[in-house]
Amino acid sequence: MDAFVYLRISTGAMAAVLAELATKQGAKRAVVTVGDWDVLLHVNGPDLGTIANALVSEIHSVPGVDRTLTAPVIPAERLGLLGELGATLPPIGPNACYVHLRVKAGHALDVYESLRQIPEVAGVAIIGGAWDLLVCVPQPWEIASGVILEQIHAIDGIVATGTLVSIAYEEPEEDRDQFSSWS
């Protein structure tokens, strides 16, 4: 079972949190994002109970993690998506846009199939929680925004969208001489 976990991180704690998340069992990949959440984390476990227990016991205890929200992926076989229509989860990586969709009741599979027809879409997951689908457009915002506005927003059945933009995070080098830039 897969889930996406959204994390809010304390100011100045990003590098330490990312390093700690990399050691956690079930944590597949994390990326720093710009938007409502600071980090998007893909986790995996045998079932939702195991994932939830790992979150409570391991991720919630990481210093610098202020808040989390978990969106479980609805398994493809539960939706009848097998073979060619099988699920391709959104890949987690830098310089991508993660578009969250809320759809009209009963339209999730139709929207899912329409999204899979867009060449710029790298993966789609039907998720539980506040949003119905998570879509990855693996392009920087300047390019992905056109795909989102012109192609994704045009799909019938979409009620609302929200986007997280992932970035290539680099830990800033510490400037030991705070006055050196004043010279």
Image: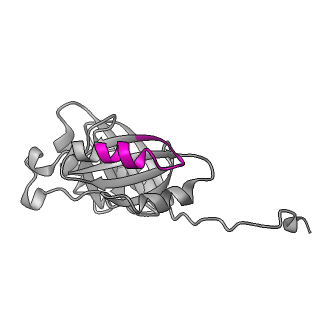
Q: Position of residue 46 (x, y in %)?
A: 18, 52
Left or right placement of residue 122 versus residue 172 in this view: left
Q: Residue at x 32, y 48 (%)?
A: 54
Left or right placement of residue 163 versus residue 183 in this view: left
Left or right placement of residue 166 versus residue 104 in this view: right
Q: Position of residue 13 (x, y in %)?
A: 58, 53
Q: Position of residue 14 (x, y in %)?
A: 55, 55
What is the magenta range? 53-68
Look at the picture and state if 70 lies above or below 176. above
Q: Residue at x 45, y 46 (%)?
A: 61
**Quarter containing the C terminus:** bottom right
Residue 40 in view:
yes
Q: Position of residue 159 (x, y in %)?
A: 32, 34
Q: Residue at x 34, y 34 (%)?
A: 130
Q: How many marks?
A: 0
Instruction: Using the image as rendered, state which of residue 23 and residue 118 is in the foreground.
Output: 23
Left or right placement of residue 80 versus residue 112 in this view: left
Q: Residue at x 34, y 56 (%)?
A: 136
Look at the picture and state if 56 lies above or below 141. above
Instruction: Using the image as rendered, state which of residue 145 and residue 84 is in the foreground.
Output: 84
Look at the picture and state if 103 lies above or below 11. above
